[in-house]
Image (cartoon, rainbow, N blue to C red):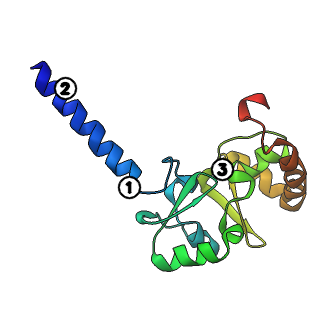
Amino acid sequence: MKTSLFALITAVITIFSIHTSADSISNSTVGAGGYDLVSYQDGKKPLPGNGNFVATVDGVNYIFSSKENLKKFNKNQNKYLPQYGGYCAYGTSVNKKFIGDPNVWEVVDGKLYFNLDNSIKAIWVKDIPGNIKKADKNWKKIKNVAASEL
């Protein structure tokens, strides 16, 4: 019994090791809740990505719905990446890092912004230009600070 349990555990570890070493992705952090970042730019409902089309930026894996969207992203990542590392845009404007909800979003001047939830977004949209200005300034200071320290 112990031998078969050991063999099973060894097999699982081996399969996992082969799978994880087969690619260059060092972690499985998925950005934007798995949504295709390029699809936000058309103003419609964002499309879910899939594991066939992946780009990794700063240790975060972004998945896309098509090869075409992956190519668009790779040509101009800064155009498509969410602002403030995907944290809530309003939270950043008040020196906080709240997890941004990829279903609560806005594209402003070609840039993607997430907010914590719809009630926070309702506050944010009252002064989008002012909140972006504050968030841009704050982000420089808090970018590398842990959310728990703010």
Residue 2 in the image: x percent, y percent?
A: 13, 19
Q: Quadrant of the C terminus?
A: top right
Q: Residue pushed farthest top?
A: 2
Q: Quadrant of the N terminus?
A: top left
Mark nearer the viewer, 3 or 2: 2
C-alpha span from label 1 to label 2: 24 Å
Query: Which residue has dot 2 on it?
Result: 6
Which amino acid, by three-letter code, is at mark 2?
Answer: Phe
Q: Earlier in the sequence, mark 1 or mark 2?
A: 2
Which residue occupies the foreground of this view, 56 or 111? Answer: 56
- Residue drawn where x is 87% and y is 44% of the image: 141
Q: Earlier in the sequence, mark 3 or mark 2?
A: 2
Q: Which disc is residue 103 wearing?
A: none
Label 2 neighbour load within 10 Å: few <14, some 14-19, many 20+: few
Q: Residue pushed farthest left?
A: 1
Residue 98 position by quadrant = top right
SS at badge 3: helix
Q: Residues at badges 3 and 1 in contact (C-beta under 8 Å)?
A: no
C-alpha span from label 3 to label 2: 50 Å
Residue 139 in the image: x percent, y percent?
A: 83, 49
SS at badge 2: helix
Label 3 neighbour load within 10 Å: few <14, some 14-19, many 20+: few
Label 1 neighbour load within 10 Å: few <14, some 14-19, many 20+: few
On the picture, is 77 further left or further right than 2?
A: right
C-alpha span from label 3 to label 1: 40 Å
Residue 47 in the image: x percent, y percent?
A: 49, 67
Q: Which disc is residue 22 wearing?
A: 1
Query: Which residue has dot 3 on it?
Result: 118
Which amino acid, by three-letter code, is at mark 3?
Answer: Asn
SS at badge 1: loop
